Image (spheres, helix red, strand yellow):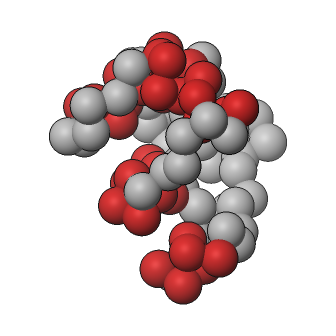
């Protein structure tokens, strides 16, 4: 996911993020807030509790090997059955 796309997804969820916000997070120039971390975890399907988020731990779920849980819009993955949105 590009920095721009991530910022846009976060903005859609109520966080005033821009591409520069993501760049600063990636370089350690800005810390992520707990609420932002929780939103990111839900958005990226990371299985994490608040304690995990505070400690920087959590686990990524297994993604479909074919569509990576993100089939194209209007299509359904033949492997996992997920429909694209």
Q: Residue furthest left?
A: 14
Residue at image location 35% in from the left, 35% down from the top: 10
> Can you give x and y, in whole percent of width and height, for residue 38 in the image?
42, 62
Residue at image location 49% in from the left, 18% down from the top: 20
Q: Residue furthest front?
A: 29
Residue placed most toward the observer, 27 or 5 = 27
Asked if residue 77 shows in the view, the reply is no
> Can you give x and y, in whole percent of width and height, for residue 9 in the image?
37, 30
On the rendered image, what quadrant is the N terminus found in?
top right
Residue at image location 68% in from the left, 40% down from the top: 28
Image mark count = 0
Identify the image quadrant of residue 68.
top right
In the rendered view, does 85 fall on the left or right side of 30?
left
On the rendered image, what quadrant is the C terminus found in?
top left
> Can you give x and y, in whole percent of width and height, for residue 62 in the image?
74, 59
Residue placed most toward the observer, 4 or 70 = 4
In the rendered view, does 65 fall on the left or right side of 30?
right
Asked if residue 19 shows in the view, the reply is yes
> Can you give x and y, in whole percent of width and height, for residue 66 in the image?
75, 35
Identify the image quadrant of residue 57.
bottom right
């Amino acid at each position: 996911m590009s920095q721009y796309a991530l910022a846009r997804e976060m903005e859609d969820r109520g966080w005033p993020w821009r591409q520069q916000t993501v760049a600063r997070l990636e370089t350690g120039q800005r810390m992520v807030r707990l609420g932002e971390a929780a939103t990111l975890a839900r958005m990226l399907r990371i299985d994490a509790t608040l304690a995990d988020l505070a400690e920087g731990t959590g686990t990524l779920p297994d993604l479909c090997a074919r569509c990576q849980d993100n089939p194209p819009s209007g299509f359904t993955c033949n492997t996992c059955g997920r429909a694209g949105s």
